[in-house]
Amino acid sequence: MVQYVGPPLDLSFAALSDATRRGIIDQLGWGDASITSLADTFQMTLTGMKKHVQVLERAGLVVTQKVGRVRTCKLGKRGLKAEAEWIEAHRRLFEARFEALDEIISEIKQEGRDD
């Protein structure tokens, strides 16, 4: 049975619920980037980008480091393993329920043919 996992997943899924933040994760998958370059890429203000990065950082998905006047972002080390496991467990649950529904529908159709 699938168990409720709690706050770490809540933070991750909340962070990933925004298209811009998913885009940031995609962008950082290609390499580290400064907040300024991310803001330019996504055509937003520096303040707006900082807020998005802070959400990702709180969720542990992004790590930032300030060197001089430049704050660089990179993907966090923890990855998305727990999130992927949660999704996979629920995918299997849905799949099992749909298979059971298919069986019921097949039985009903067969009974209709038998009459």
Image (cartoon, helix red, strand yellow):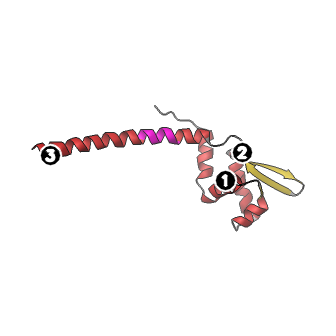
Q: Main secondary structure of the magenta part?
A: helix
**Label 2 – label 3 distance at C-alpha:** 57 Å
| Three-letter code for the amino acid on which mark 3 is drawn | Gly
- The magenta stretch is 87-93
Instruction: Report which residue position mark 1 lands on.
Output: 25
On residue 76, the disc is 2
Residue shown at 71% from the left, 54% from the top: 28
Q: Residues within 10 Å of mark 1 (few under 14, many from 20)?
A: many
Q: In the structure shown, which secondary structural element does the residue marked by tag 2 occupy?
A: loop
In terms of sequence position, does the residue under pointer 3 or pointer 1 come before the other?
Answer: 1
Q: Please check the rendered image and state whether residue 72 is part of the magenta-colored stretch, yes or no.
A: no
Picture layout, residue 82 above or below residue 26: above
**Res. 42 image quadrant:** bottom right
Instruction: Please say if the residues under marks 3 and 1 sit with CB atoms less than 8 Å apart.
Output: no
Question: In the picture, which quadrant includes the C terminus?
Answer: top left
**Label 2 – label 1 distance at C-alpha:** 10 Å
**Res. 48 image quadrant:** bottom right
Residue shown at 35% from the left, 43% from the top: 98
